[in-house]
Amino acid sequence: KYFSRQGIKIIVTFAAPETKRIPCGYSPEFRKIEEDVMSVAEDTPATRVLLVEYSTQKTVAIPALLARVADARFVVEEADSLTAALLRLTSGGIDIVLLDSRLPDSYGLQGLGTVRSRFPDIPVIMLAGSADKQWAPHALRMGAKDWVVKDSIDGRLLARIILRHIKKA
């Protein structure tokens, strides 16, 4: 589902494990396994992610990558600027922020400093291109929980990073 309001997009993603329907001739044990696997996604609480990203191409890719992760559910809300992100964070209910290092109203680690100073209890994972990796040590010292290079992002790995830092928070 997709909603949009004041520069903030909300995408609700739900990914059930990919399974094939078992024909009637298969044993009840196989059917029970299928039911157990399908119920995992329903029982997993949704993690609310605020994706602060200006690039439309990557913005579309990250929710799609997270949607493919079978053992977790994510509600991804998107903001295309630091201003829109701060407005959304003020409303509460966000578990973690994925923050791009290049936004129209924030460059480098400026956005990280702003988010951390106003919302110190919300974990922030920095997203950056491979050209910006020199900022990673500084971002970690400023309170970023992790640094992810957008060009080589993998949905399963990103989901593990997100879930690990939410458990620590």
Image: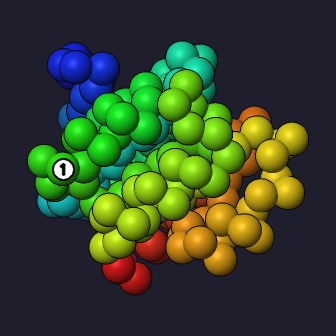
Q: Compared to 17, does 45 lie above or below?
A: below
Residue beneath the point at 35% across and 79% down = 169
- Residue 161 showing in the rendered view: yes
Seen from the viewer's position, the closer of residues 95 and 154 is 95
* Residue 126 place in picture, x, y as percent: 59, 54
Q: Quadrant of the N terminus?
A: top left
Which quadrant of the figure has residue 81?
top left
Q: Compared to 110, does 14 lie above or below?
A: above
Seen from the viewer's position, the closer of residues 49 and 118 is 118
Seen from the viewer's position, the closer of residues 120 and 114 is 114
Q: Compared to 142, does 10 lie above or below?
A: above
Q: In the image, 54: left or right of 63?
A: right
Residue beneath the point at 41% across and 57% down = 115
Secondary structure beneath dot 1 equals helix
**How many numbered marks have been drawn onto this rendered protein structure?**
1
* Residue 160 place in picture, x, y as percent: 51, 63
- Badge 1: residue crowd in 10 Å (few <14, some 14–19, many ≥20): few
Q: Compared to 95, does 156 lie above or below?
A: above
Q: In the image, 75: left or right of 120?
A: left
- Identify residue for label 1: 90
* Residue 121 place in picture, x, y as percent: 31, 73
Residue beneath the point at 36% across and 35% down = 83
At label 1, which amino acid type do we have?
A: Thr
- Residue 154 showing in the rendered view: no
Q: In the image, 62: left or right of 43?
A: right
Residue beneath the point at 52% across and 56% down = 112
